[in-house]
Image (tube, rainbow, N blue to C red):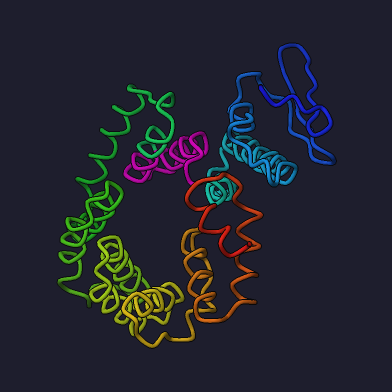
Amino acid sequence: MSLNNSDMIHMESREGMVRFSVEDASTNWMDKDDLFVKRTDDDNLNSDFLIEHLKKEIQIKNIFDEAISLFKSQKYGKAIEKLDEVLFYDPEYGDALIFKSYCLREQGHFVKALRYYRRAVKSDESLRNNEYHKALARQANDERSNFPKLKLNIFTGDEHFAQGEFERAIESYDKALEDPSRFKQSILSKLLNKKATAYLKLEDYGEALKCFQRSREVDGNDYAVFGMGLCQYELDLDIDSEFRRCLKISKRQMLQQALILNNLGYHDDSSRIADYLRKNHFRKDDFYQKLSTLID
């Protein structure tokens, strides 16, 4: 570990294990080659908020450790909840992605487990496990073969989306949407939101807006309302004020919301969101640079 600022971080060593602490925050004992050591290397830390960044990394590491404990106790649902907290902070946290794959596999969700395995390997090549991949791929294929055609089209669309094949994802979602009456309202709105989001990725805001509007008509959900606001902003249209109350969105969507609010003159709302995001993102990447425009 190249971080040697003893006044900032304290390291204890015991029988090949190490533990780190910053002020009142402390990790559990871990191996010397634990991912935490790499994550808190000087090159990965934000020197402008060093103490806050270190304390957040410790918090996330402890949440991750709690998730692993739940996994070992076969409490897969609760483990996933904790892993999702880690992945909200860092969507590319490789170890969290691979353990979410393990949890989903144990729950019998093989297609989803395969998707998270691929994300984990994309994030960290050292997590590649060919035997696990082969076994999981077989199980995922078996699961797909038992899907009703309707569900298969949705999962196929999700896989195309995960691979960045947004046009093909839309084609699959359209096949599933051929008979909307077969869906419950909540499921239909989610499927329309999936299709709309694929259009967003293609920057086709007009088609995305149509899908979000239909989703909102089916089931007045916050995701559709926020999606409508985003599309209306991109198309230079009057924005539905309801989008400001939307919840349960990703960090990138929250950043987009804050940027839009700032441009519209809702500076207090924008600052509130930006302050929350700053406490959950420290790495100096493109996200941080955009966020800094709101904080500064």
Residue at (56, 62) in percent of width and height: 293
Residue at (17, 74) in percent of width and height: 179
- Decide if residue 164 is on the left or right side of residue 225: left
Q: Position of residue 116 (x, y in %)?
A: 39, 41
Q: Quadrant of the C terminus?
A: bottom right
- Magenta segment's dominant SS is helix
Q: How many marks?
A: 0
Q: Position of residue 228 (x, y in %)?
A: 37, 78
Residue 233 vs 75, above or below: the answer is below
Q: Position of residue 71 (x, y in %)?
A: 57, 37
Residue at (27, 75) in percent of width and height: 211
Residue 167 location, quadrant: bottom left
Residue 97 forms part of the magenta stretch: yes
- Decide if residue 17 is on the left or right side of residue 151: right
What span is in magenta?
91-116
Q: Nearer the viewer, residue 23 or 102?
A: 23
Residue 53 forms part of the magenta stretch: no
Outermost residue to the top: 15
- Decide if residue 112 is on the left or right side of residue 17: left
Q: Quadrant of the N terminus?
A: top right
Residue 273 location, quadrant: bottom right
Q: Position of residue 91 (x, y in %)?
A: 48, 46
Q: Nearer the viewer, residue 288 or 78?
A: 288
Residue at (55, 59) in percent of width and height: 291
